[in-house]
Amino acid sequence: MEGNHAAARSDAKRLLLISNSTQHGGGYLDHVESEIREFLGAARRVLFVPFALFDQDAYVELARARFERIGYSLHSLDRERDILQAVESADGVFVGGGNTFRLLNSLYSSGVMPALRAQVARGIPYIGYGRNARAAHSAVPRGKRAAGGGAARRILLAG
């Protein structure tokens, strides 16, 4: 196994859940840079899940530039030929904030949600922020606490 995969244990979820991507007066993820570095450690290939925003190209470039500045190679799931292989070969996963319905709809319709959940359960480092912080974690809110309306609730319950 490569990267942090060798250190992953089947019973240890590794989650870094961040409330927001910016803090007043700072730039994108500036306020959590040291936590991200410490959390990802030796991982180098981080898979970005950009599906929560409409303008995914700009989102990918923002995230890629930020992660590269702190020494990580960010690969966007929407640009991978084999998305399941991309999930399985990632050293870490970063899920961006935005529209929860858009994110979950994309993850389920593409068939990638089970693979993401399996990687999280295996112990791959998982970073998420905003309401989408727990998107691929087995503790995604269900029922009345789900993201409001019926369509979003059906997607959450599908997992």
Image: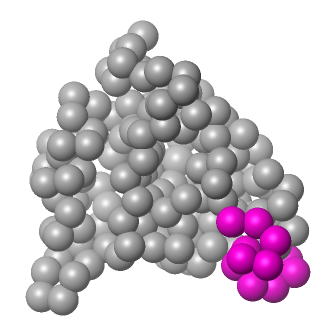
- Give the residue at x 16% y 68%: 30
Q: Is residue 29 visible?
A: yes
> Which of the pair 6/50 is nearer the observer?
6
Q: Indicate the quadrant where residue 82 lies.
A: top right
Task: Report the colour scheme.
Answer: one colour
- Give the residue at x 38% y 73%: 19
From this view, report whether residue 76 is shown above or below residue 29. above
Q: Horizontal and vertical percent for residue 46? A: 36, 41
- Asked if residue 59 lies left or right of residue 118, the reply is left
How many numbered discs? 0
Single out the residue that lies furthest toward the bottom.
24
From this view, report whether residue 63 is shown above or below residue 98. above
From this view, report whether residue 112 is shown above or below residue 33. above
- Asked if residue 100 lies left or right of residue 53, the reply is right
Tell me if residue 147 is in the magenta stretch.
Answer: yes
- Give the residue at x 17% y 70%: 31
Q: Horizontal and vertical percent for residue 43? A: 28, 31
Tell me if residue 9 is in the magenta stretch.
Answer: no
Q: Horizontal and vertical percent for residue 132? A: 54, 67
Q: Horizontal and vertical percent for residue 92? A: 40, 38
Q: Quadrant of the N terminus?
A: top left
Q: Is residue 57 visible?
A: no
- Give the residue at x 55% y 59%: 134
The range drawn in magenta is 141-151
> Which of the pair 84/149 is nearer the observer?
149
